[in-house]
Amino acid sequence: MMDLDPRQYEHVIVNDSDVRNIVLSYLVHNCFNETAETFLACTGMKQPVDYLVDMDKRKSIFHFVLDGNALKAIELTEQLAPNLLEDDKDLHFDLLSLHFIDLVCSRKCTEALEFAQTELTPLGKLHKYVEKLEDLMALLAYEEPEKSPMFHLLSSDYRQNIADCLNRAILVSAYPNLPSYSSMERLIRQATVVRQFLHQELSKDGPPTFSLKAFLKN
């Protein structure tokens, strides 16, 4: 394997069509449908019809999760990607947990407890969910759950993460050949890894080396 200095690529010209595909991939993955349509019209790129049709459905699901309607998100997900949640128990548990959290925050503790017993407890029998179920149930003990040690479960970041995971899972289920992460996100991840690698190499004696084959493989 040949190790190459990454500085050799400073003057590599990036094809405009590649840049456009990267931008479009990001817009489609993240459900920016109006922006994607405008971008396609301005660039004259071929419209990926199926992706744009399902983008509206994915966007609705995404916002239902963010807006506190996890049950509706589950319903629409089962229509768009049948068997997804049945196969992905972790994601299903997280979505159900959001509904439980919304009930707790609405001070509907009796309803939350009943929901936990019927929907969460059966899944909670699996060892990997026990600790998380205990954290969820502990929220019932606080008059102000947002001030409890489990306050992170009520955060927008927690909800956003679940919405992102669901969106990626739907993409993989509906389009097996489409990466779960957009090209831009993967490039950022790869660039971060390369930067960390170069930082480590620069701290050593001698010029940094870089395996092009290993990088492209990732």
Image (cartoon, rainbow, N blue to C red):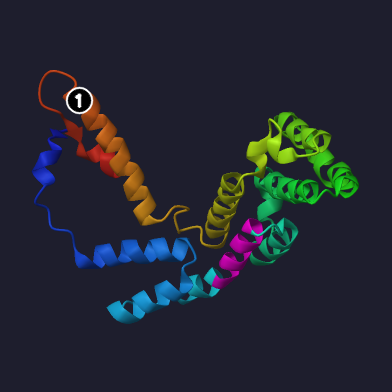
Count of numbered tags: 1
Residue 27, x across and y down, in percent: 42, 65
Residue positioned 28% across, 43% down in the render: 191
Q: Residues within 10 Å of mark 1 (few under 14, many from 20)?
A: some
Residue 209, x across and y down, in percent: 16, 30
Q: 142 and 42: which one is in front?
A: 142
Residue 142, x across and y down, in percent: 80, 35
Which segment did they paint magenta? 56-66
- The magenta stretch spans residue 190: no
- The magenta stretch spans residue 60: yes
Question: Does 4 sit left or right of 43 as displayed?
Answer: left
Residue type indicated by callout 1: Glu
- Residue 145 shows up from this direction: yes
Question: Does 35 sit left or right of 106 as displayed?
Answer: left
Residue, disc 1: 201
Question: Does 162 sit left or right of 89 as displayed?
Answer: left
Q: Quadrant of the C terminus?
A: top left
Location of residue 214 with respect to 52 vertically, above or below: above
